[in-house]
Amino acid sequence: PSPESEQIVYAALLDLAATGATVAVTAGNHDNPRRLAAVAPLLELGRVVVVAEPTSAQNGGVTPIDVAGTRLNIAMLPFVSQRGIVRVEQLMRDDPDQHAQAYAQRLNRVVESLVAPIAEDDQAVNILMTHLTVAGGLLGGGERSVHTLGAYAISAAAFPSSLHYVALGHLHRAQEMPAPCPTWYSGSPLQLDFGEENDAKQFLIIDAEPGAPVKVDPVRIERGRRLVTVTGSLEDLPGIEVDPDAWLRVRVRERATPGIADEVRALFPNAVDVTLVRDDEEPGEQTRVERIGREPEELFAEYLQQHDLEDRRLLDLFTE
């Protein structure tokens, strides 16, 4: 994350803590765990508890908090990459399905070890908070695909029924997972990719007490800038009304000409993605072309022809 992003996050965490709450944070797959660990002692002064790397229960992996006289035990497990479990010799020796099995088995043992000290504490509310992929979870659209493949998934059966609740991060779509105890992805608080533009974002309020089942109350988030896709020709686009605060993906039904993206952004200053589409093809459709042994100028001319770019200046500039 950039320094500007970190500034927003730290300010939000401290604002939450200013309400009197204790805030618990684990590192995700987009975070640099060492950077988080470096500022953890400072954040702790502001009632923000950070677990940046997998840690045993005895060494900080479990945080006990007093909430109005009730003990809350939070077991925190940050994102664990495949390379942290599957070693080079295994990658060279075993099949991919064996890598996935090794990852899931080891991560199951990590979860079991982490929650074992609190799972039978019937005088407390016991929660596991973790950042990982549970098998069967639905993607929101903006996740890193390399971190959501089967090789990174574990079964929800890894979560013991003695836990009050499992709070999941990683998948951007809010959803409840079938598991031995209440297990939810709260989802991303903002739409992070145009694949998420139809997702309703939410946060979850958990009502819990020792010896009783939890109540989970989803609350829809109404703030934040939405992502919207607009499709039409250059003639049609000026007549399309859009939310002036939304970020736009504009699909233009036109033949490719230089400067078309600038024309679109003049109409829609919030356009962050401009794509040309044709009625007779799907966006992104490509035909495989044999390129070996052919001159670059010939290949570029063919590329321009395929994309209906009839502008000799481009080919002359490329050749120059």
Image (spheres, rainbow, N blue to C red):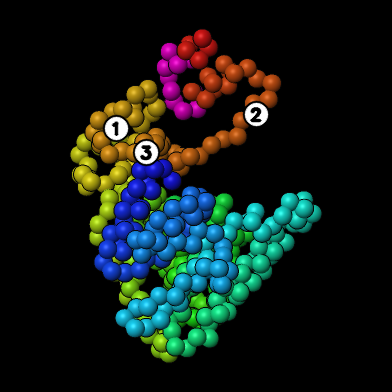
Q: Which residue is at the far right?
A: 93
* Residue mark closest to the camera, 1 vs 3: 3
> In the figure, 304 relative to 84: above or below?
above
Counting residues from the start of the chain, the first of labels 2 and 1 encountered is: 1
Q: Residues within 10 Å of mark 2 (few under 14, many from 20)?
A: few
Residue 264 is marked as 1
* Residue mark closest to the camera, 2 vs 1: 1
Q: Is residue 92 left or right of residue 144?
A: right
Give the amino acid at mark 2: Glu
- The region drawn magenta spans 305-315
Cα separation between marks 1 and 3: 10 Å
At horizontal 39% and vertical 58% (from top left) the residue drawn is 43
Q: Secondary structure at mark 1?
A: helix
Residue 1 visible in the picture? yes
Residue 173 visible in the picture? no
Give the amino acid at mark 3: Asp
- The x and y percentages for residue 31 are 48, 51
Q: Which residue is mark 2?
A: 290
Q: Is residue 267 left or right of residue 113?
A: left
Q: Which residue is mark 3?
A: 273
